[in-house]
């Protein structure tokens, strides 16, 4: 009995590892077999076997190289045989894993042309078609994406859509590079949909009952804060690990990742060449975003957000008066314009809560290595301490007032809001008058209780003006300029539509409803759920958009 060639033993060994899910060991065995392969036909079989083992290992660059190598040797170099069929399918899957959907589609077309009954090929054709529609037209199944998120899917399968934006050098060299629009953009326009390069999802956990208070027993808030710190640390470690794995398994992604901002202290490129692990950690430290954690058992987590890194979205610079809004569905980030943006203008998001004071914002932003000098920060920082103290005093005064029975009248309360307004020296488009929002909403609620619809319309328009919106004619609700966004915008717009309807101004009601829907689109990223959220009586249903906003679908 003749002894089988040495490569056969390694091939069988690799097949055994593959069947048991030990893909690294399988790849090594196939490597050894290839070194001993004595004919091109044997090499073809081994390339295909190794490429198949590399797919579940997410080594897509190498799998694609194996597929192309197999196609250069017989019998896979000619159609109408199983090796040629397997090589085309392998190439299609590898390019799909690299998110090169148009290239994957071309491989699938060849596959289906020669092997029209290949079921996997037909499935790949449908998948590639969906991804190309997403990638080239920005058309997504938002409903399906939300269903995936609610099931706890952590590896959503969607293409990136890059709208009318591109990366350019900023006018101020200290800001490095940023995202600029390539044409005039309208509010609500889709600019970017991008799946995370890598993401670490928060885990479900059960909060224990609060222990009895006593000596040596920490309070529940202390325990929760410590757990939150531990979770954040674990998430960071997981994100670094995932990023390192993807970075080294697919060399084609390295250049795009290393192009990200590396921090203010990394001036020597040679330092990073010595330690790629440190280079990756630098990119994550300065480019990662937090995003809402949707936990299947309990809904949105209000404690620890998930974390991820996005290669295109990471180029967006900060402004305390942002021009675009970001939202998330699982690890997919959605960017929409929230105002009119002129062609060749840089776009901005907020890295911190824009509801905080200038000192609070600058303190938080310092961890990113810069001192914010946006127009709003400069203007607010220039406000005298006397004006700020006067504003704080008037806000405290109005907070003690009750409107209505046993309290003050609407007119008196309204005069108090005008007193707060007088403490602002800058235009609302530069410095949103945020201290006015809560008092005006209280006044609006009282007006609605009294069915004072005309006054309610004027108050809502006043809130909008305080946020930098330009409403030319409150009676017909003609918006000339969109301004600052807060979580109350959508509800305000629906209240406005109701007030117009009560006064019989149906045309104005329709305008307000359209604006409300567009605001919903901007804040939530999609509007498929608008009809579900928008009740027949015109109110936003609690538990829908309000719930999404409260629990951080929009991370500002």
Image (cartoon, rainbow, N blue to C red):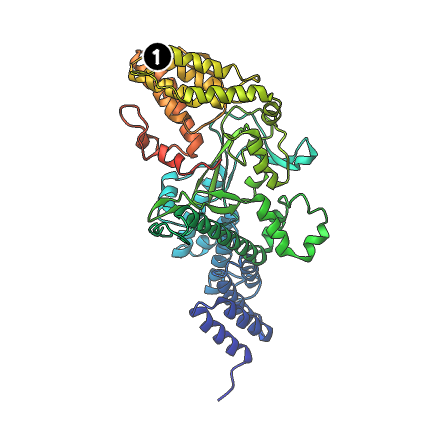
In this view of the protein, can residue 125 be seen by the observer?
Answer: no
The image position of residue 365, as x and y in percent, is 58, 37
SS assignment at label 1: loop
Q: Which residue extends farthest left? A: 536
Please tell me which residue lies in front, 390 or 84.
Answer: 390
The crowding category of the residue bearing disc 1, from other C-alpha atoms within 10 Å (few below 14, some 14 to 19, many at least 20), is some
The residue under label 1 is: 409
Which of the 4 image quarters holds residue 375? top right
Please tell me which residue lies in front, 424 or 351.
Answer: 424
The image position of residue 535, as x and y in percent, is 28, 27
Identify the residue at horizontal 44%, vertical 48% (top origin). Answer: 222
The image position of residue 124, as x and y in percent, is 43, 52
The image position of residue 309, as x and y in percent, is 53, 46
Which of the 4 image quarters holds residue 429? top right
Q: Is residue 452 left or right of residue 59?
A: left
Indicate whether 370 appears above or below 153.
above
Indicate whether 91 appears above or below 131.
below
Q: Which residue extends farthest front? A: 215
Count the marks: 1
Please tell me which residue lies in front, 54 or 310.
Answer: 310
In this view of the protein, can residue 332 be seen by the observer?
Answer: yes
């Amino acid at each position: 009995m003749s002894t089988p060639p040495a490569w056969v033993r390694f091939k069988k060994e690799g097949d055994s590892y593959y069947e048991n899910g030990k893909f690294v060991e399988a790849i090594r065995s196939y490597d050894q077999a290839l070194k001993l392969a004595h004919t091109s036909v044997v090499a073809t079989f081994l390339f295909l076997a190794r490429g198949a083992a590399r797919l579940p290992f997410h080594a897509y660059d190498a799998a694609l190289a194996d597929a192309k190598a197999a196609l250069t040797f017989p019998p896979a170099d000619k159609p109408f045989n199983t090796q040629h069929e397997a090589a085309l399918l392998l190439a299609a899957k590898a390019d799909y894993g690299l998110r090169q959907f148009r290239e994957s589609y071309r491989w699938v077309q060849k596959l289906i042309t020669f092997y029209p009954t290949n079921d996997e090929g037909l499935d790949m054709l449908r998948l590639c078609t969906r991804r190309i529609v997403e990638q080239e037209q920005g058309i997504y199944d938002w409903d399906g994406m939300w269903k995936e998120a609610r099931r706890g899917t952590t590896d959503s399968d969607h293409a990136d859509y890059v709208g009318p934006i591109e990366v350019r050098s900023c006018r101020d060299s200290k800001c490095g590079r940023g995202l600029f629009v390539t044409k005039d953009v309208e509010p609500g326009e889709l600019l970017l949909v991008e799946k995370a390069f890598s993401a670490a999802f928060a885990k479900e956990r059960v909060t224990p009952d609060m222990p009895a208070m006593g000596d040596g027993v920490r309070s529940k808030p202390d325990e929760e804060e410590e757990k939150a710190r531990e979770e954040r640390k674990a998430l960071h470690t997981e994100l670094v690990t995932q990023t390192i794995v993807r970075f080294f398994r697919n060399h084609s992604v390295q250049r795009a990742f290393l192009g990200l901002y590396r921090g203010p202290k990394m001036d020597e490129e040679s330092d990073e060449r010595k330690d790629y692990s440190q280079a990756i950690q630098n990119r994550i430290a300065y480019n990662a975003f937090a995003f809402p954690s949707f936990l299947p058992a309990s809904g949105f987590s209000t404690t620890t957000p998930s974390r991820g890194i996005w290669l295109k979205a990471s180029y967006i610079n900060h402004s305390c008066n942002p021009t675009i809004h970001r939202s998330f569905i699982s690890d997919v980030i959605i960017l929409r314009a929230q105002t009119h943006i002129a062609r060749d203008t840089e776009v901005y998001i907020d890295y911190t809560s824009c509801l905080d004071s200038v000192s609070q914002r600058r303190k938080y932003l310092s961890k990113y290595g810069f001192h914010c000098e946006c127009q709003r920060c400069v203007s607010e920082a220039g406000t005298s301490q006397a004006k700020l103290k006067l504003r704080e005093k008037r806000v405290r005064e109005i907070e003690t007032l009750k409107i209505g029975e046993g309290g003050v009248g609407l007119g008196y309360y309204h005069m108090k809001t005008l007193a707060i307004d007088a403490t602002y020296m800058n235009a609302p488009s530069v410095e949103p008058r945020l201290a006015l929002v809560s008092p005006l909403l209280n006044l609006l609620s009282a007006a609605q209780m009294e069915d004072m619809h005309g006054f309610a319309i004027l108050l809502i328009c006043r809130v909008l003006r305080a946020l930098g919106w330009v409403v030319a004619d409150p009676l017909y609700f003609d918006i000339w300029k969109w301004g600052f966004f807060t979580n109350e915008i959508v509800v305000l717009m629906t209240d406005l539509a109701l007030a117009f309807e009560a006064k019989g101004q149906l045309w104005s009601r329709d305008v307000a409803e359209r604006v409300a829907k567009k605001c919903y689109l901007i804040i939530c990223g999609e509007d498929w759920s608008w009809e579900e959220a928008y009740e027949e009586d015109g109110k936003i249903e609690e538990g829908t958009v309000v719930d999404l906003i409260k629990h951080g679908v929009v991370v500002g």
